[in-house]
Image (cartoon, rainbow, N blue to C red):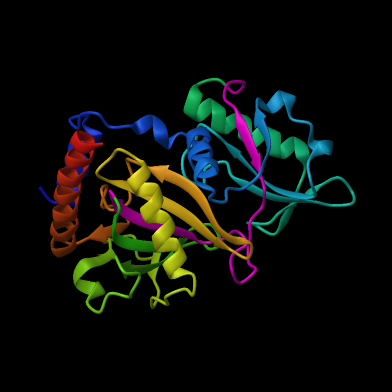
Amino acid sequence: MNYLDRMRHRIEGKESRLPAYLGDKRKVREIAQLMGIRVSEIYFDGKLEDLQWSELPNEFVLKPSFASTSIGVYLLQRQEDGTYLNILTNKLVELAAIEEHLKTVALRFLGDEDRGTYLVEELLRDIDGTTPPRDVRLYSFFGEIGMVLMEDHLNNSHAEAMYFDGDFEPFEDRESRYGIAKGAEKLERILPSVRPAEARELLITAQRVSLAIPCSFSRVDFYNTSKGVYLGEITFFPGTFYYKDRKIMHDIEADRLGRLWARAEERLEIAKTTG
């Protein structure tokens, strides 16, 4: 099976002993802290009604803990008049409007505007000082990195992506491996891949995290910030490429990553029997 076949197999619940619970944001923080890996500071974790806005720092990230990707995410900076600057849109927004929008997100995902919890986290900046930092997504196969996707999907009306191989080097034949889905050309953009100076640290840290998880494949996401490399999340069911609605993985690459996945399964079984 290639990578996409294996992902479908996993999503359909046919993969046994998958430690999906380790993808929970709180578990990710525990893993990072045990391993001495940086994670963003949490200022609040709870229900919206319990959030004391006046006790928060002047800038922070607010996001639902139950929604996916960028849905309901706010990057906020408090102003002297009590309003907040939405850094993503560069527009001022009232506190009441923020709360009202988050309630609509809860209603959409949970069926009840008063359900769900929210996280308020440290606002991180990219290595170049911009915020939010780009996502650095390492497709990890039990200690072996298959490919790296660096993506900015919050700063623009379209997502901007760079693709790298498992050594964090640009693909010389990227066009034969990755592309944009038909009809999504206005939503996606592929940029020339520029290897960051911190590539080695990102690779080593992702390998460490991947080996600590009893799973043949996981996507380990980082932020390469002005304060260092931060672990963002661990994903076992990434929809990127699988749904084929925006980013496309061609057969040659799906086959290659499928072979890495198969080898990772073998190494994982050996580790379980000898550990």
- Residue 215 image point, x, y percent: 28, 40
Q: Quadrant of residue 119?
A: top right
- Residue 4 image point, x, y percent: 19, 49
- Residue 101 image point, x, y percent: 63, 36
Q: Is residue 20 above or below residue 155?
A: above
Of the 4 image quadrants, the one containing the C terminus is top left
Farthest residue in the front direction?
A: 274
Residue 261 on the magenta segment:
no
Q: Is residue 187 above or below residue 62?
A: below
Q: Residue at x 27, y 47 (%)?
A: 243
The answer to whether any part of residue 47 appears in the image is yes
Residue 132 on the magenta segment:
yes
**Does 182 sit left or right of 198 as displayed?**
left
Q: Quadrant of residue 50?
A: top right
Farthest residue in the left direction?
A: 1
The answer to whether any part of residue 187 appears in the image is no
Residues shaded magenta: 113-142
Closer to us: 50 or 233:
233
How many numbered circles does the render carry?
0
Q: Which secondary structure dominates the residues rendered in magenta?
A: loop
- Residue 94 image point, x, y percent: 77, 43
Q: Is residue 190 above or below residue 154?
A: below
Q: Residue at x 49, y 75 (%)?
A: 197
Q: Residue at x 25, y 73 (%)?
A: 174
Farthest residue in the right direction?
A: 81
